[in-house]
Amino acid sequence: MTRVTVIGTTSWGTTLAMMLARKGAEVRLWARTQEEAVALERARENQRLLPGFPFPPGIRATASVEEATAGADMVVLVVPSRSLRENVRGLRPHLDSRSIVLSATKGLEKASANRMSQILEEELPKAFHSRISVLSGPNLAKEIAQGMPASTVVASQDEEVALRVQELFMSSTFRVYTNTDVVGVELGGALKNIIALGAG
């Protein structure tokens, strides 16, 4: 069974965790505090950010980084762009270099204007660099949690990594495309709202 760690209990992080669990993955959803982890486990849904969508059986919430990352085939980062670097630094000692590292965070770092994959490359040892991937698309968490049709793009410098992520997420209602244009995928996700506002 594939084991996946999802870092971030945002609405999008919760949705991705649910999608993976519905496909049979064993998912650990990492919460920042023990209180949050207990609340998620007790309710078996994210009542604060994604109410009304019960967790599939394959999801377990935990506040322990060690427990969340142990044996993970893939680690998915779904935290605000402003806190990605801090989160990666906290995770780094617990990551297995065999794990795929997937950023599902959109945006640029304010201080450096770096893309999320650049932050990952700066903060993670070189052994991880070929296993970094990014996911971005016109995705609304609630619609996808409801099972409405949607698509997204996964990019990695290593095509095999992108194909593995595609395999994990692809479903009858969620179509995943792959490519190696990491820069284009990240900038498209970061700049789309600016372009939309400019276009009126």
Image: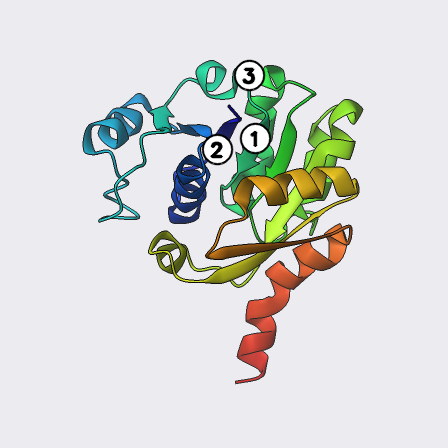
SS of the residue under disc 2? strand
Q: Residues within 10 Å of mark 1 (few under 14, many from 20)?
A: many
Label 1 sits on residue: 75
State the residue in front, 3 or 10. Answer: 3
- The CA distance from mark 2 to mark 3 is 15 Å
Image point 53% across, 44% down: which residue? Answer: 169
Residue 52, image x, y percentages = 22, 49
Outermost front residue: 172
- Give the residue type at disc 2: Ile
- Give the residue type at disc 1: Val
Residue 80, image x, y percentages = 50, 45
Tag nearer the camera, 2 or 1: 1
Residue 61, image x, y percentages = 35, 26
- Label number found at residue 7: 2
- The CA distance from mark 3 to mark 1 is 10 Å
- Give the residue type at disc 3: Gly
Q: Decide: is 193 above or below 4.
A: below
Image point 25% across, 41% down: which residue? Answer: 54
- Contact, mark 2 vs mark 1 (Cβ under 8 Å): yes
Q: Residues within 10 Å of mark 2 (few under 14, many from 20)?
A: many
Q: How is the image coloured?
A: rainbow
Residue 68, image x, y percentages = 46, 21
- Label number found at residue 71: 3
SS of the residue under disc 1? strand
Residue 162, quarter of the rendered image: top right
